[in-house]
Image (cartoon, rainbow, N blue to C red):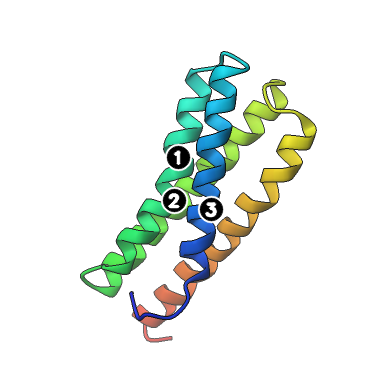
Amino acid sequence: MGNGKPNPVREKSFLFALRIVKLAKYLQVEKHEFVLSKQLLRSGTAIGALVREAEHAQSRADFISKMSIALKEANETDYWLDLLHQSDYLSRDSYSSIQPDIEELIKLLVSIVKTSKGMLDGK
């Protein structure tokens, strides 16, 4: 919930969304790939939007719900990146450049969800 402190997941998810927008544009313009790139664009930008929504959650349960959905979107984004790489739309270098970012976001979101659930359960 918003407390004015620096928020690494907010910053990282926004910067990641910017990379996804640029990657989707590249895939559409240079590779003429429209279906997978739109899926990637939707899920990859949804992460940061959900993190932002969670900052103004109405309750801890609402916060956990939004962060859990952000985690699902991050997992989906990881899937689309793998698929684009394995189908040769995304070069090894491009994939190796962006893949650690989504892994880091997933780890952060897993930690936030687990910690928040523990607080909700009184652990």
Q: Quick one: which residue is furthest to the right in this view?
A: 93
What x and y, as percent, mark residue 44?
49, 42
What x and y, as percent, mark residue 34?
49, 18
Read off the residue under disc 1: 43
Q: Quick one: which residue is furthest to the top in this view?
A: 32
Q: In this view, does 49 lie to the left or right of 29?
A: left
Characterize the local packing of mark 2: few (<14), some (14-19) or many (20 or more) Cα atoms within 10 angstroms: many
3D distance between C-alphas at marks 2 and 3: 11 Å
- Residue, x 69% and y 51% (percent of image)? 100
Read off the residue under disc 2: 47
Read off the residue under disc 3: 15
Q: Name the quarter where the N terminus is drawn.
A: bottom left
Quarter residue 121 falls in: bottom left
Q: In this view, does 7 lie above or below 79?
A: below
Q: Give the label, 2 or 3, closer to the camera.
A: 3
Q: In this view, does 95 lie to the left or right of 30?
A: right
Q: Name the quarter where the C terminus is drawn.
A: bottom left
| Count of numbered circles on the image | 3
Characterize the local packing of mark 3: few (<14), some (14-19) or many (20 or more) Cα atoms within 10 angstroms: some
| Frontmost residue, 33 versus 21 | 21
Which three-letter amino acid code belongs to the residue tagged 3?
A: Leu
Residue 110 bears which disc, if any?
Answer: none
3D distance between C-alphas at marks 3 and 1: 14 Å
Q: Is residue 67 above or below residue 118?
A: above
Q: Give the label, 3 or 1, closer to the camera.
A: 3
